[in-house]
Amino acid sequence: MSGSTTVPAPQPLDRGSGPRMTWRLLDYWATVYKRTWRGSIINSFVSPILYVVAMGVLLGGFVKADPAKLDGAHSYLAFVVPGMLSAQTMQVAIGETTYPVMGGIKWHKSYFAMLATPLRVADIVLANLGFAIFRIGSSAAVFVLVMAPFGVFTSVPGALAAFVIQLLLGLAFAAPIFAYSSVLKDEGGFSIIYRLLMIPLFLFSGAFFPLSNLPAPLEAIAVCSPLWQGVDLARMATLGTWHAGTALVHIVYLVVLAALGTWLAIRGLTRRMVK
């Protein structure tokens, strides 16, 4: 069976469709994670935290803090932590919606097996995105708990808000990347995502230094990136420097991106797999 194999369109269901069927895929993803969780420990939990300790605690000790130049942060550690937290969310979201999606379509063909049951394409996409959100949430929760003793969060509600922001930011990345993965014929296209999207965003979206340090054209481009929207939201939450109007713009931006990406993902996978 080739990667372009399609299956007959499922017949209309008279029972069990919708969120109930999506929820039933929980068993599948729980089984997958039970067998693969060890492989995610380093990338999802250990590496980001080591990065923060190295960049924020050790290197940051040599950076003279100027709240006026660090978006209100009293130290470089307080400035870099929300950026690293958001960058980790982006990496986990991309990791969960590139090769795993390609595997479901082309390699182990689990999506075809799912479609042979009463499940719909929408159920498959939503369940997969739900699992991605679980992975993002679990890694973000560990990150927040580990960094809390360093005094980088000004309040408990701020830390909780930074965690919730990661869920929205993660979906804003996961859904469009899923849509892209669903139409790729082979894994070669993922190099574009990792080299031309993830790495530039990681370096130039305000995680390590204020965007005002960039030349004006690059700053304008960086402001449009979803990662910067998430970094700025998380920074406002952790530092307690909320600006309602700016926060609302960020949230609307990420919600629209997540909704549009989900629609495109369902549409792309339907065209790929259903006649």
Image (cartoon, grey):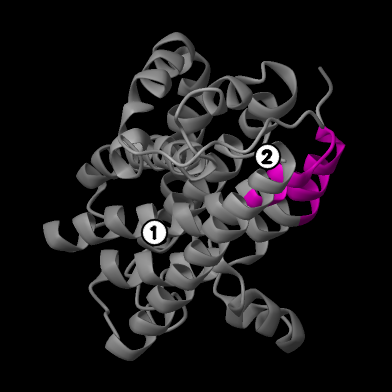
Horizontally, is 149 left or right of 23 in the view? left
Label 2: state its secondary structure: loop
Residue 185, given in percent of the width and then of the height, sits at 84, 37
Lateral position of residue 108 relative to residue 185, left or right: left
> Which residue is denoted by mark 2 in the rendering?
274
- Given residues 25 and 221, the one toward you in this image is 25
Q: Is residue 36 left or right of residue 182?
A: left
Rendering coords of residue 99 (x, y %): 68, 31
Q: Residues within 10 Å of mark 2 (few under 14, many from 20)?
A: some
Can the viewer see residue 61 in this picture? no
Q: In the figure, is residue 214 to the left or right of 49?
A: right
Q: Answer with the quarter of the image where residue 96 lies.
A: top right
Rendered location of residue 19, percent (x, y): 31, 43
Question: For residue 73, which quarter of the picture?
Answer: bottom left
**In the foreground, 188 or 238:** 188
**Residue farthest toward the top in the current orientation of the protein:** 35
Q: Main secondary structure of the magenta part?
A: helix
Q: Amino acid at mark 2?
A: Val
- Residue sitting at 69 percent across and 43 percent down? 182
**Boundaries of the magenta span:** 179-196
Q: Considering only order in the chain, which callout, 2 or 1, is on the residue closer to the N terminus?
A: 1
Give the residue displayed 34% in from the left and 60% down from the top.
Answer: 165
Give the number of the disc on residue 168.
Answer: 1
Describe the element under mark 1 as helix, strand or loop.
helix
Give yes or no for residue 195 being in the magenta stretch.
yes
Amino acid at the residue labelled 1: Leu
Residue 107: x %, y % from top left: 73, 19
**Distance from the alpha carbon under mark 1 to that under mark 2:** 29 Å
The reply to whether residue 121 is visible in this rendering is yes
Quarter that holds the N terminus: top right
Q: Nearer the viewer, residue 170 or 162?
A: 170
